[in-house]
Structures are given as C-alpha cells and as structure tokens.
Image: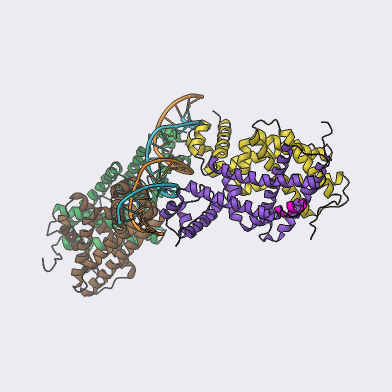
Chain colours: A green, B brown, C purple, D yellow, E orange, F cyan
DNA sequence: AATGAATGAGCGTTCATTCAT
DNA sequence: GATGAATGAACGCTCATTCAT
C-alpha cells in the first residue's frame, strides 16, 4: 500500500480518536489499530504523538479555511458573501464533526505548540471576516468608519457566535438540515447590527 | 490548619493546574505540591481526581453565574441590565482567568461527567441572556415578536460571542483594563442588531 | 470506657475484618471504625497491625484449645473422650467462624511470625489427639503398639480431616445442626480404623 | 524470546512469589524481576494481577489433578488404585511445593473469584476419591451400603487428611523421601476404617 | 483517655517509544 | 515496507503510622 494512502488513513484514525478521547487520553495503540497499521509504522511516518496531533490540526484547519474561502464567492455582492461564508462554515463543521472537535475543543487545551497552530487558523478566519465586514460596510454606504480594534472585536464576536451556534445546532438535531436556519439567525443578528454601527447608530450607557 | 482552609487551597491549586495542563495532563502530585499539602491529604479531602475536577467546575461555575446575576441589577431598565450583565461576565472572566479556562476550555473536552456540569452552567447563562433579550425587546417597543427558537439561537450566539471575546481580550492584554471596551463592542453589536430584529427589519438572501 | 472493654472490642473487630479480608487487605481504618474507636487509640493499645494480628491469633487459638480441652472429659472412657473432643472442636469452630477463618485460612498464609503462632496451636491440638489415640489404643487392648511417627501422622491426618469436615459441613448448611452427624462420620472412620491398626490388621501393597 | 517461553517463565515466577508472600503482599515488581522481564511485558501477556493469579491457580490445579488421575491406574484392583492415587497426590505436592501452597494456602483466602477456581479443583479431587471409595466398598464385598451423604463426608475427610499430611510431611523434611511412608499411614488408616464401615461395624456413643 | 490532621512509601497500571528482524 | 517484542517513566491511589492537642 502506497505511503500516501496509509498516511491519510492514519490521520483519519488520529482525528477520530483525538476527537473522541482528547489529546492525552488518546493512545497510540488505539490510533494504530483504527488505522489498520502497526504502531512502529505510525512512528515511521509521523514521528511522534505530538507531530501526529499537529498534522491533524494542520490538515483540518486547512480544510476548514479552504471550505470557507471557497464558499465566499468573490463575484457576489458583499452581503451575499458574508452569508455564503457563514453557510460554508456551518456546512463544513457539520460535515466534519471530528475535525471540528479537534480544532475547537482539543487543540486549544493542550499546551503551547498546538494552541499556536490553532491560533493561526483562527487568525485566518478572523482575517476573512474582517475583510467581509469592511466590504459590507463600504457596500452599504458606510458613514461612520469603524476603528480597527473594533472591527477585530466584531470579527472575534462573530466567529465565537458562529462556533457556539455550530455546537448548539449540532446537538439540537443530528441532521444538518437546519444549517440554513442557523446561518440565517446569525446573519440577521450580525447584518442589522453591523448596518447600524456603520451608520453611527450606537447604544451608550446613560451615565457614561 | 483547619480543614476548610486547606480544602480551599487545594481547589485553588487544582484550578490553576487544570487550567494550565488540562485534566489528563494535570498530575495530582503537582496539585498537591502547589497546594502545600501531601497527596494523601488531597485524596482524604477530595476523594479522587475526578471528584476534584468536578469540585473545581462547580465552584468556578457557581462563582461565575453569581457574578453575572449580581451584576444584572434588577431595578435598572432593560438595556442597562444587558449592559451590566455583559460587563459582569467580562469582569469576572478577566479576574479569574484560570477558572474561566477550566470552564471554557477544559471541562467540555473531557468526557460526559464534566461536560454535563458545564452544560448546566451554560444553560444558566443562556437562560439569563434569554430573559434579558425578551425584556429588551419588550422595553424597546417590539413590533415583530421573535419566535422562541430564534430567541434561543440569539442567546446562544450572544453567549458564544461573549465567550470568544473574553478569550480574545484576555490574551490581547493581561490587564482587565479594556474590559469595558470589550463589553461596549459586543453591546453595540447586539443591541442595535436586536432592535432591528424586534422591529421587523431583517436581511434576507436575495435568491431565497 | 475502661481499657479492657475497648481492647476486646478492638480484637473482635479485628478478627471479623481479618477473617473477611485477609491480613494484607484488611485496613486499620476499617478495623478502627468497626471497633468504634479512633485509629490512634488502636495503635496506643495494640502497637501495630502485626501485633494486632498476633493478638487475634493468640486469643482465638487459646479459645479453641480451651474449648477442646473442656470438651474432653477426663473421667470418661477413652472412646467417649475422643468423641467428645471431636464434638467440641466442631462445635467451637462452627460457633466462631471468624476466629476459625483467621486461624485456619489467614494466619498460615502470611509469613513466619504468624505461621509460628498458629503452628503452636496446631501442635497443641496434635498433642491432645496423640494422647487420645494412645489412650484409645490402650483401652481397646492394643496388641500392636504403633511407632511414634505413625501416631503423629495419624494425629495430623485426623486434625486435617476434622478441619476439612468443619469447612464442608459449614458451607453445606449454615445451621450447626448437623455438627453431631459430622462428628459421627469422622468418629466412625477414625475409630474403626484405629482399632484395626492397633490390632495389627493392616493393608499392604501387594508388590511391596 | 518467543512469547510462549516468556509466559511460562512468568507463571513460574508468579507461583513462587505468590506462594512465598501471598496474593496481596506479592508485588508485580518482584514477579517481573524474578521472571527476568519488565513489568509492562507481564501486563501485556497476562493482563492484570488478578488474571495472573487465576492463571497460576488454573495451571497448578490442572497439573495436580492430572497427576492424581494419571497415578490412579484404571486397570488395577480397587485397593491398589486408592493407594496409587494417594501416592500420586503426595508425590506431586511434594515435588511442587509452591504450586501446592498457592492452591492450598493462598487461593482460598483471597476472595470469591479465586476461591471458586480452587473449589472446582477440590470438587474434582473429592469426586475421584468418592469413586475410589465406592469401588473399594464394592470390591471388598460390601454388606452394609453407605448412604450417599456419608460417602461424601468420608471423601472430604480423606482429602482433608491428605492435604494435612502433605503439609506436615513437607515441612518435616524437605526431601520427598518419606512420601511413601506418609501415604502408607493414611492408607492404613483409611483402608481399614472403610472396610469396617462397609461391613456394618460401627462405633456409637454409649448414651445415644 | 482520645482524636483531627497529616505523610512517606509503595503498588497496580498505562503509555509513548524503540529495536531486531 | 512492516512488525513482534520489549521497556523507562510516570500516574492515580492506598495504607500503616505518627504528632499536636
């Protein structure tokens, strides 16, 4: 069996086991068995548990960001592009729950080396969203430009909301059927909020 | 040294170590040493690693929800109350980063028993937010009542956004100084978005 | 509470726990709790786990040998005395199963110090039986005196048979009702066997 | 080194250590060291301390019962067969004192799972003896058939006597030289006793 | 007379990792 | 290319034992 195929099987197995058990609790024995290979072979191809986990993170992160980027159709108007990006995100995470679990739940909780890898992914997501926000603002006739820090904050809020909704809708119904509805909820929330902000309509505490 | 004091020291140490290392990677030796006690004493007071982790989760969850509830001043108008709740949330998570890390990052990734405990906390947060949203809608002269499912979705999105922002602002600057700014960002986003929604102003995909 | 009473309670508890769990698996915590005293008090009175176990063995051994000796009525004819001794043995072991378990099952399996104590008891039992055998032989008109080694062997066989029957009849029916029957079985077996031996009627392998 | 060989070495070491120390006091470290292997290998091959002990019991029990069955030559007359069986029993226990100690002293004192395994062995021994008694009775022209319960009692008594004598002769002299003598003592005792019983010659307490 | 508080030492078990083949 | 055999190191947990009071 060619190395490339074997390696993909190993990564598939590793993602599944890491998602189910967590990084520490996952055992190389279980991964090797699920991959249908012997343990020394896993070490020959992937060096160590740490490298294996990193490889999983990188592969899943690349797949996710690629899915989102592909969903954002560059030719569409700004509002459609935000909408498409959200749908792409929800669709991919729903279709690859193990990969999403590794990225969202496991990678950030196990020390620096992995946290850095996943932070890079997150930054890419935030970059995409930042650009979408900027474009959206411009497209809807922005009259009150937002400071850079606030845009970053909004992007983080949006990503967090998306992550939270992804988890919520996944556990509410196994089927990904309502993915569209979930996206719509968030889109409504974000879109109208953004429009107000970019037109200077803000809320302010009375006493401040 | 009286038992109560020792027990609190142990929980403090456990929260710190669990936050830094994760549940599996944390060793009872390290926790005991950080608590300034011997390992058998930790077991005598807290039974097992699992019980110790549960105790940490319960203590930190109770503290967080109490902080949020205390911040939401029942006498204030609805917008102020949402604002206050957000500030309370951000202030508490910034002041107790280890506790927040245990709740947000570690507890959900290590098996059913802990996930259930933290799900209960999250539900309490969502409940609080749901009520705030409902009141806010009523207070601002709602003309387009939202279906229950959508309110739940919004609440989850808001909580997710808040969680994400908490993590972002915590790692951006150790100081809790900008907590107010973070809360303002989210408040603006949420408040204006909500007002539009409750007055029937929505975004809809063109082709749908 | 006077020391003597407390000490007896401790020994009672220890015998029960040692019988149920074995020497190593028995924990001083459980013994102290069952005795209704604190652990340091147990140590104050009985020094160590080893000493406590020794004390149990000595007390139970003394009680058993006393019961057997009391049962053997010195005034009766030899056959009656053997019969009475057997009945005394079975009655006592049935009435004190924990003590018997400690002596028979636990004490011999846990290293030299305890094995020696229980060997002493066994020797006393063998001595009693040896004397009974000798007397019985004399009483029934012995025509073929038995060598000393053989008497010792017979005594050991008899004690072993008695021990085995004690266990068997105990587990066959919880009630000690059939103790008499058990004793009769053994008595028949031993008595007639002895009579033949002491009159020179032996079995011998054909080719020897 | 092939697995089979290693596994036998481990069982040999385990039998020796369990015999010397008892189940609880035996440490897996000592067993592994005596077996000339590392501890993880012992676990890889034999799963757990409990499984290891069970494996010891089963192996030694099978060896003992096989030795006795092999000694009982089916073609010989009944008295010879009883004689041969006794000699086989004494010879095997003398040649494998550790195995015998595990079966007789340790296995019965450490909880249900092991007690059941050794009870099965004992039942097999009792069955063999029961059959030998029945055949012996028939062979010697039985005129007073014994009730089934009494036969069972006699078998238990005989096995107990044999077990006791095995221990006694083993500790009296390490050499197995006197095994023949020990067997003769018991055979004389049992044979003549049986013959009387099966011809209705019994002892009865005077007052009963 | 009696105990709450505390620990050093050790055990059963697991796991990532490496050779020799 | 692929593996059966093997291990050093560490971890969760328990227990006999001792002080200070």
* Along the viewing direction, whichever of A27 and D25 lies nearer the viewer: D25
Quarter of the image with the C terminus of chain A in it? bottom left
Left or right, C61 with reference to A5:
right
Give residue D35's position: percent from left, percent from top: 53, 32
Give residue B104's position: percent from left, percent from top: 30, 55
| Residue positioned 71% across, 57% down in the render | C179
* Along the viewing direction, whichever of A62 and B179 lies nearer the viewer: B179
Give residue D151's position: percent from left, percent from top: 78, 51
State yes or no: residue C79 in magenta. Answer: yes
Give residue D115's position: percent from left, percent from top: 61, 48
In the image, residue B45 above or below residue D140: below
State yes or no: residue B169 in magenta. Answer: no
Left or right, A5 with reference to C199:
left
| Residue positioned 64% across, 56% down in the render | C92
Quadrant of the rendered structure where residue A57 is? top left
The residue lying furthest to the front in this view is: C75
Please report the bounds of the magenta region as a residue range: C78-86
Q: Can residue B61 be seen in this view?
A: yes
Left or right, B117 with reference to D87:
left
Q: Is the magenta stretch mostly helix, strand or loop?
A: helix
In the image, residue B87 above or below residue B135: above
């Amino acid at each position: 069996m060619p190395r490339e195929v074997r390696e993909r099987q190993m990564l598939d197995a590793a993602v599944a086991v890491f998602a189910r058990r967590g990084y520490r609790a996952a055992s190389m024995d279980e991964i090797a068995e699920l991959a249908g290979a012997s343990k020394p072979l896993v070490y020959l191809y992937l060096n160590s548990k740490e490298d294996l986990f990193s490889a999983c993170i990188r592969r899943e992160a690349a797949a996710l960001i690629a899915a989102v980027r592909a969903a954002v159709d560059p030719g569409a108007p700004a509002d459609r592009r935000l909408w498409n990006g959200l749908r792409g995100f929800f669709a991919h995470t729903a279709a690859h729950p193990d990969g999403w679990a590794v990225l969202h739940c496991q990678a950030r909780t196990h020390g620096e080396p992995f946290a850095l890898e996943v932070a890079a992914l997150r930054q890419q997501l935030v970059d995409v969203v930042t650009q979408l926000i900027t474009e959206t603002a411009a497209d809807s006739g922005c009259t009150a430009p937002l400071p850079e820090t606030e845009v970053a904050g909004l992007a983080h809020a949006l990503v967090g909301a998306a992550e939270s909704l992804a988890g919520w809708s996944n556990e509410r119904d196994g089927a990904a059927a309502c993915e569209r509805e979930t996206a719509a909820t968030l889109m409504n929330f974000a879109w109208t909020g953004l429009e107000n902000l970019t037109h200077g309509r803000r809320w302010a505490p009375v006493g401040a």
